[in-house]
Image (tube, grey):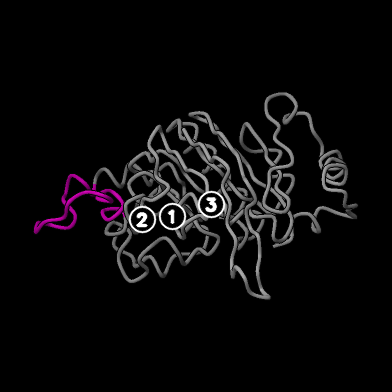
Amino acid sequence: MLKLENISKTFNKGTINEKKALCGLNLHLNPGDFVTVIGGNGAGKSTMLNAVAGVWPVDSGRIILDGKDITALPEHKRAKLIGRVFQDPMMGTAPNMQVEENLALALRRGNPRGLHWGVTAEEKEKYVQLLKPLGLGLEDRMSAKVGLLSGGQRQALTLLMASLQKPKLLLLDEHTAALDPATAAKVLELSDRIVSEGNLTAMMITHNMNDAIRHGNRLIMMNHGKIILDISGKEKENITKHELMDMFASLSGNQLENDQVLLSK
């Protein structure tokens, strides 16, 4: 579903602030893969997601999504192919618009726009049925401004919006980092369900090693713009946090005292 072939990206090239963010990165995702991504500060995690989303052009290499080379495709033209949920609950939605209006925007993403009613009665009923399983009471707040929702409600809504058209790829960029532990757990549970029920291909950056182990079918670890560990199946299911830390120390040549060092922002 996704192929990153020899991707390189350097910021501020030729200056004193030059930073090699991605160094010949290679990654292949099969359809239905749910990959968790971990790594230290400056490892290249967010740069990789931004490169896939088209936020900035890569210096070299190819990005292939579902057999189509999208390397030169601008960000707005990738919108129909890629769903994304950000770390900040305030991003990914229109705060001054109603819940139902935000869902209507998501439903029409990538399609031609015309002059007609923004939200039909049929659509409203559809949105109620989509919101009910979230268990957050949003189906009773369809006309509420999204900016008035809690962080957890907003991230749940953003998840639903990002997956409404079943994107080729779903990108979750530390989407629970700004939430309290209980709310984060609920949003992660919802993420698992949306990815599983929609049979979506997804990548999730996380700052929590236990979450990286617990969720998804595959785990990759990045360091200095490259993937240094890629595990899946039983190996991922059975690995412990301490074993993961030891692997990082062995593969990167750096010793860690705790997972916060590895997973710092």
| Res 74 label | 2
Q: Residue 1, relative to residue 91: is it above or below?
A: above
188 and 34: which one is in front? Answer: 34
Please report the bounds of the magenta region as a residue range. 103-124
| Res 127 label | none
Residues at discs 3 and 1 in contact (Cβ within 8 Å): no
25 and 248: which one is in front? Answer: 25
Q: Residue at x 83, y 42 (%)?
A: 251
Is 135 included in the stretch rendered in magenta?
A: no
Image quarter hosting the C terminus: bottom right
Q: Secondary structure at mark 3?
A: helix
Callout 3 amino acid: Leu
First in sequence, mark 3 or 1: give its number.
Answer: 3
Q: Secondary structure at mark 1?
A: loop
Residues at discs 2 and 1 in contact (Cβ within 8 Å): yes
Callout 1 amino acid: Gly
Is 107 included in the stretch rendered in magenta?
A: yes
Q: Which of pointers 2 and 3 indicates the residue nearer the eye?
A: 2
| Res 54 label | 1
User: Label 1: how many residues lie within 10 Å, few (<14), some (14-19) or many (20+)?
Assistant: many
| Res 49 label | 3
Q: Residue at x 52, y 29 (%)?
A: 30
45 and 174: which one is in front? Answer: 45
Q: Quadrant of residue 207?
A: bottom right
Task: Pinpoint residue 211: horizontal percent, then vertical percent.
Answer: 68, 45
Q: Residue at x 42, y 33 (%)?
A: 198
Callout 2 amino acid: Pro
Q: Secondary structure at mark 2?
A: loop
